Amino acid sequence: MRMEGGEEMQAGTPAKWVRLNVGGTVFLTTRQTLCREQKSFLCRLCQGEELQSDRDETGAYLIDRDPTYFGPILNFLRHGKLVLDKDMAEEGVLEEAEFYNIGPLIRIIKDRLEEKDYTVTQVPPKHVYRVLQCQEEELTQMVSTMSDGWRFEQLVNIGSSYSYGNEDQSEFLCVVSKELYNSPNGLSSEPSHKAKVRPASPGPCSCSL
């Protein structure tokens, strides 16, 4: 067995193991792992294409990049998942992924960063309040049929009453609220359908949302 071009040679045929010296740290992996992405720098390197790369005294390929971010990249090639320590910057891994030209990893990190930026810049929700005038007999149905994000806040007896049939009916003011979420570009995400309260019996009612 002997070393040639960063690869262990057996009987003149390249073995599956490859040594990489990344910024002074040696990584040992397989040709199959490095060639997981056919268009990547690492695949072209171990396939013997015309890439200029010196070798150290052990024959490992010398790559002048940060070894801190190379570990997650190598692991991604091994199992297809991006696993980062909590203190590792995704931007640093993205920079290295772009250097090594690993397309799927680049897309994953960019999606993560875009999602993180959206979470940070998302506009806090706004509270909208409405006051509804309702008849006494309609209160239960109004509260039970509220939908589309509206919720009951407060009930005020306005002190007036009227006769409906053989019963005296009081009137109330019902305060309801709703949260409206806005995207960073200012567009409201409020649903287009609004809840409506159907009166329990015929008669005048302004209880609608």
Image: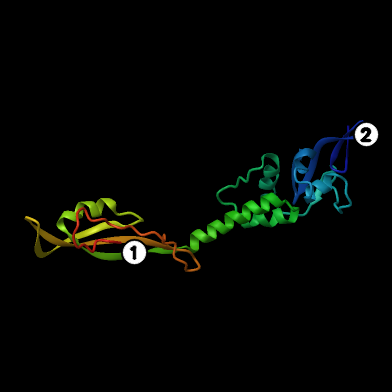
Q: Secondary structure at mark 1?
A: strand
Q: Earlier in the sequence, mark 2 or mark 1?
A: 2
**Based on the displayed image, in which of its 4 quarters is residue 147 positioned?**
bottom left
Report which residue position mark 1 lands on: 127
Quadrant of the rendering where the N terminus is positioned: top right
Side (left or right) of 173 relative to 7: left
Which image quadrant is residue 18 in? top right
Q: Give residue 12's mark.
A: 2
| Colouring | rainbow
Quote the CA–CA distance across marks 2 and 1.
74 Å
Q: Which mark is residue 167?
A: none
- The reply to whether the C-beta atoms of the residues labelled 2 and 1 are less than 8 Å apart is no
Q: Is residue 104 left or right of residue 159?
A: right
**Residue type highlighted by circle 1:** His
Circle 1 Cα neighbour tier, 10 Å, few/some/many (<14 / 14–19 / ≥20): few
88 or 126: nearer the viewer: 126
Relative placement, left or right, of 192 versus 108 is: left
Q: Is residue 69 above or below residue 187?
A: above
**Residue 191 locus on image (x, y percent):** 41, 59
**2 or 1: mark nearer the eye:** 1
Quarter of the picture containing the C terminus is bottom left
Q: Residue at x 24, y 61 (%)?
A: 207
> Could you say where residue 197 lies in the image, as x and y percent from the top left?
27, 56
Q: Nearer the viewer, residue 7 or 90?
A: 90
Closest to the observer: 38 or 186?
A: 186
Position in image of residue 113 (x %, y %): 58, 57
Depth check, front residue: 34 or 89: 34
Please indicate whether residue 158 sits to the left or right of residue 58 in the image.
left
